[in-house]
Image (tube, helix red, strand yellow):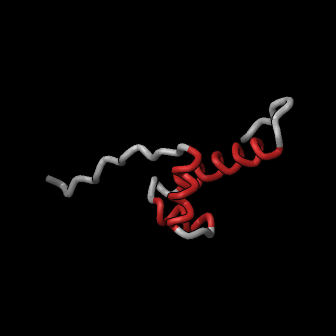
Amino acid sequence: MVLIAQNQSLKQAKTDFENAYIRQAIEANDCRLRKAAEALDIHYSALVTKMKRNGIEVKPQMEASDGV
């Protein structure tokens, strides 16, 4: 949930909402950016561009072990 701060511009409110929505989509898709982009109905490259522009980083996931 994004809270509305007093004296916040519409532009900043939209950016805050978009950032929160993108982060939620990434988390819901186990940090798989292609799946998150699909869920958001945007191209993968558009998602990566938005992430770079807004400083959204994904922590690298630990790779699943193959039972060794």
Closer to us: 20 or 50 = 50
Closer to us: 57 or 65 = 57
Q: Is residue 22 left or right of residue 30?
A: right
Which residue sits at x=44%, y=59%?
32
Q: Is residue 17 above or below residue 40?
A: above
How many marks overall?
0
Say whether residue 27 is visible.
Answer: no
Furthest residue in direction right, as rendered: 7
Q: Is residue 48 left or right of residue 68?
A: right
Closer to us: 33 or 1 = 33
Q: Where residue 33 appears, x then y in whole percent? A: 47, 60
Q: Where residue 64 appears, x then y in whole percent? A: 28, 53
Which residue sits at x=75%, y=42%?
12
Q: Is residue 57 above or below residue 7?
A: below
Q: Is residue 3 above or below residue 41?
A: above
Q: Where residue 30 appears, x then y in whole percent? A: 46, 54
Which residue sits at x=78%, y=46%?
11
Say whether residue 63 is visible.
Answer: yes
Q: Quadrant of residue 40?
A: bottom right
Furthest residue in direction left, as rendered: 68
**Image quarter (top left, top right, bottom left or bottom right) of the N terminus:** top right
Which residue sits at x=82%, y=39%?
9
Q: Is residue 19 left or right of residue 56?
A: right
